[in-house]
Amino acid sequence: METIEQYFERPDTTMPQSPCGRLMVRVLAKNPGMGFETAQAEAHKLLQQAAGRRHYGVPQVLSPEEQSVRDAKASAYWKARTAA
């Protein structure tokens, strides 16, 4: 099994201190079973979303459990708002 350090040493990968590399490490920390290529694709997707915003910032990386809690809170908020 290849480690993250070995992955970044390969010549065809991003640099570890690039925005994509730093975000990849955060994505892998939240989703330990994810592969390196999938984590890189996810990091690119998150950076593209952040680049389209008015104020650029490094996006939050949420675990699946954190994402479901966030979605439930947003759903409850909008249900309460439309019911009023």
Image: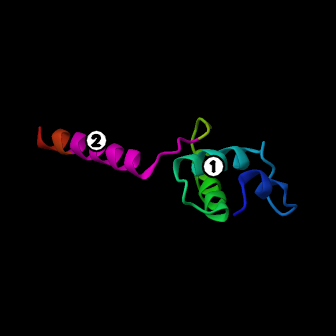
Residue 3, label in figure: none
User: What is the spatial separation of the Cα atoms under label 2 and label 1, in whole angstroms?
Assistant: 24 Å
Split into 4 quadrants, where in the image is the N terminus? bottom right
Q: Which residue is mark 1?
A: 47
Q: Position of residue 80 (x, y in %)?
A: 16, 40
Residue located at (39% from left, 44% from top): 66
Would you say residue 62 sits in the magenta stretch?
A: yes
Q: Looking at the image, tell me whether mark 2 or mark 1 is earlier in sequence order.
A: 1
Identify which residue is drawn at 63% across, 49% down. Answer: 47
Q: Nearer the viewer, residue 58 or 64?
A: 64
Segment tinted magenta in the rendering: 59-78
Secondary element at image label 1: helix
Side of 80 where 64 appears, left or right:
right
Residue under the point 11% across and 37% down: 84
The three-letter code of the residue at mark 1 reads Leu
**The stretch drawn in magenta includes residue 73:** yes
Circle 2: residue type: Lys
Q: Position of residue 83 (x, y in %)?
A: 12, 43
Residue 73's mark?
A: 2
How far across and down, in percent of the image, does residue 76 sit? 22, 43
Bin the neighbour count of mark 1 within 10 Å (Cα to Cα): few under 14, some 14-19, many 20 and up: some
Name the dominant secondary structure of the magenta segment: helix
Mark 2 residue crowding within 10 angstroms, few (<14) / some (14–19) / many (20+): few
Q: Between residues 60 and 39, which one lies in front from this camera angle? A: 39
Front residue of 7 and 73: 7
- Where does residue 32 sit, x and y in percent of width and height? 55, 54
